[in-house]
Image (cartoon, helix red, strand yellow):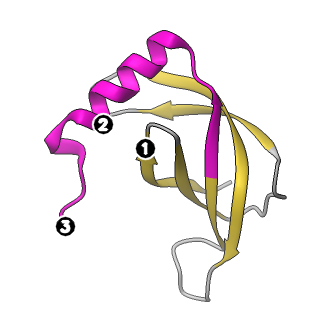
Amino acid sequence: MYRLAVNVGAGGLRIYSDEAYKIDTKLELDMLLPQSDSVKCLAQVVWVKELPPGSPAQYDIGLKFLQVPKAAQSVLEQVLARDDVRPDD
């Protein structure tokens, strides 16, 4: 199953997926962060958009973090604060 994080923030993330999820679905995530351990958390689907043919996946999905362990939140915040992991504007 294909899933790719497109945008990650302190409150949630946006992913591309070939699997459609219903709004309010809860997902257990294991995110692999650059130069860090994986971060496990619980997220909820808040929006789903079908992507056109030729896109990287079938669906564009917005997730809201529900539970992020304190240690994992700290790692996530440190990674998000680094300039070398931000996309070019």
Where is residue 22? Give x, y as percent: 84, 58
Q: Is residue 78 left or right of residue 67?
A: left
- Asked if marks 2 and 3 touch (Cβ < 8 Å), the reply is no
Q: What's the amino acid at mark 3?
A: Asp
Chain-order first, disc 3 or disc 1: 1
Residue 79 picture quarter: top left
Numbered range of the magenta stretch: 63-89
The residue type indicated by label 2 comes to Leu
Q: Is residue 68 magenta?
A: yes
Q: Position of residue 52 (x, y in %)?
A: 61, 88
**Is residue 41 shown to the viewer in this render?**
yes
Task: Tell me the residue that label 2 is attached to.
Answer: 80
Q: At x 38% / y 17%, what residue is drawn?
A: 74
Q: Are marks 2 and 1 in contact (CB under 8 Å)?
A: yes
User: Label 1's element?
Assistant: strand
Amino acid type, callout 1 = Gly
Relative placement, left or right, of 87 versus 6 is left
Q: Please give the name of the residue rendered at 45% of the width and 21% of the height, measured from the top-left corner.
A: 73
Tell me the residue that label 1 is attached to.
9
Q: What residue is rendered at 47% in x and 18% in y?
A: 72
* Residue 89 marker: 3
Dot 2 or dot 3: first in sequence order is 2
Q: Is residue 70 magenta?
A: yes
Instruction: Point out the image quarter for the C terminus.
Output: bottom left
Q: Earlier in the sequence, mark 2 or mark 1?
A: 1
Q: Is residue 53 above or below residue 82?
A: below
Query: Could you tell me if residue 37 is visible in this image?
Result: no
